[in-house]
Amino acid sequence: MNQTIEKFGYPATLLREFDHWLVLLRPAQVTLGSLVLAAKSDATAYHQLPKPAFTEQADAIAAIEKALAQFCKYERINYLMLMMVDPNVHFHVIPRYSTARAWRGVDFPDAGWPGPPQLGSAVALTPDRIAELAQELRTKFK
């Protein structure tokens, strides 16, 4: 796996694997259910991905949106391809909502609603909580 995937906690944060993509739990939860859609390729530019990755991306996005709709009932969803610090092709997937969501006693407000997500306001979870959240979200990808 590439360094970007490893930085986001793989394999502990893996929720679903496709041929060309991984869906990972984002350890810093900007909003409840924040994910990373990461290309398995070593590509550092979107156009460098193999053509089948683009077709498969549609399947990955459909799985993500179905799982997150069940899990956090988002109102909107943002896909951010930032690639400023982490060089390999990946998207930050940020479910958006107008009222805070709660999970196991922790509130997850959407600090940027209705504007752009505020990445710096992410809820930091302990490694045990990350594992619990990842396990719960994996069940939504079945």
Image (spheres, helix red, strand yellow):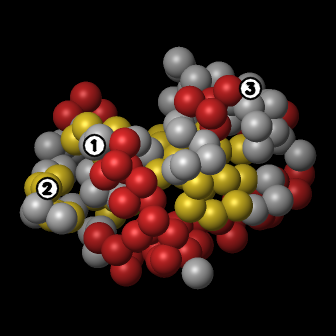
> In the image as oriented, which residue stretches furthest toward the front?
128
* Mark 1: amino acid: Leu
Locate residue 117, reporting x and y percent: 28, 41
Residue labelled with disc 1: 125
Locate residue 71, reporting x and y percent: 34, 74
Q: CA gap, disc 1 to disc 2?
A: 10 Å
Locate residue 135, reporting x and y percent: 45, 65
CA neighbours of label 2 inside 10 A, class few (<14), some (14 to 19), many (20+): few
Residue labelled with disc 2: 106
Q: Nearer the viewer, residue 26 or 81?
A: 26
CA neighbours of label 1 inside 10 A, class few (<14), some (14 to 19), many (20+): some
Disc nearer the start of the sequence (1/3)? 3
Q: Nearer the viewer, residue 24 or 56?
A: 24
Above or below: residue 59 compared with residue 118: below
Above or below: residue 40 compared with residue 15: above
Circles 1 and 2: CB atoms closer than 8 Å: yes
85 to the left or right of 6: left
SS category of the residue bearing label 3: loop
* Mark 3: amino acid: Thr
Q: CA gap, disc 2 to disc 3?
A: 35 Å
Q: Is residue 137 visible?
A: yes
